[in-house]
Image (cartoon, rainbow, N blue to C red):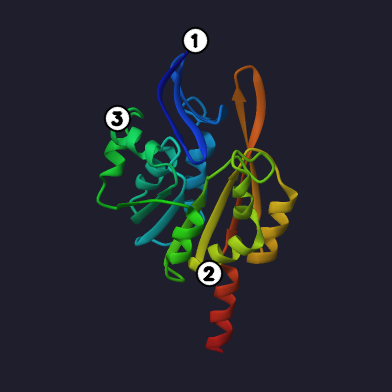
Amino acid sequence: MAEVLARAVGERGELALVRRDDALELRVNGVFVMDTAHTETERLLAGATLAHLDRTDGLRVLIGGLGLGFTLREVLADERVTEAHVVEIEPELVGWHRAGLVPDTAAALIDERVRLSVGDIADVLLAESDGSCDVLLLDVDNGPDFLVYEENSALYEPQFLTTCRDKLAPGGTVAVWSADTSPGLLRAMRDVFGDCTELAIPVILGQRETTYHLFLSHQVQLQQAGLQNSL
């Protein structure tokens, strides 16, 4: 039996927070987006990406999409992180977190390392300074082939990925979450960054086993350019 805890209707349609059994579900226009029962990939989005960095401190992380807060909480658990900038397009979702409807995230949002921007990730990222981010985590839709918002297709294309590359500091890493594999996204990230690793994470949804996917790239082009300039 499902219980609607909160519901809002805005310019992008309906957003709902639903309790089903012992889990919370986030739904957009009636489409399942994520829940608190299967959090492996949201946490791995942060954990696997941070593990690729050999920095000992001073990590600046930008998270595209607050979701149910698991990525943010995983980021804050890393003591090397000095700034976690969260960008969320739905102000109502931010309000639900702050009101305590999603357990544990209200405390995370008042962590002194957290900066919160309500807006479109493409606009917010474009306003950031080049090289200002060490880790960029993108979980803003279900992936390029299972979009909740059709306009989000631009977030998986070379133009936006190039902006991501420009905002990364040398040696920085970007990770993109997707509900399924995507040869097109893999190809685009390899074209822009010069490399991309796809990680498949098995999950069980009800009685069905499936996989979610992470696509990771590194700021190797800037590293190489810096090396060439130093010779």
Which corner quadrant of the image does residue 82 belong to?
A: bottom left
| Residue 74 appears anywhere in the view | yes
Residue 36 percent coordinates (x, y)? 46, 27
Q: Residue 73 lies in what quarter of the image? A: top left
Q: Which residue is drawn at the image coordinates 65% and 65% (left, top)?
A: 192
Q: Secondary structure at mark 2?
A: helix
Residue farthest toward the top in the current orientation of the protein: 1
Residue beneath label 1, please? Answer: 1
Please give the residue where the numbered disc 2 appears in the rendered image: 166
Residue 170: tell me if it is visible. Answer: no
Label 3, secondary structure: give it. Answer: loop
Q: For the residues carrying marks 2 and 1, which lies nearer the camera in this image?
A: 1
Q: Earlier in the sequence, mark 2 or mark 1?
A: 1
Q: Along the horizontal axis of the image, is 123 left or right of 85?
A: right
Label 1–label 3 contact, CB within 8 A? no
Amino acid tagged 1: Met
Badge 1 element: loop
* 75 relative to 209, above or below: below
The residue under label 3 is 100
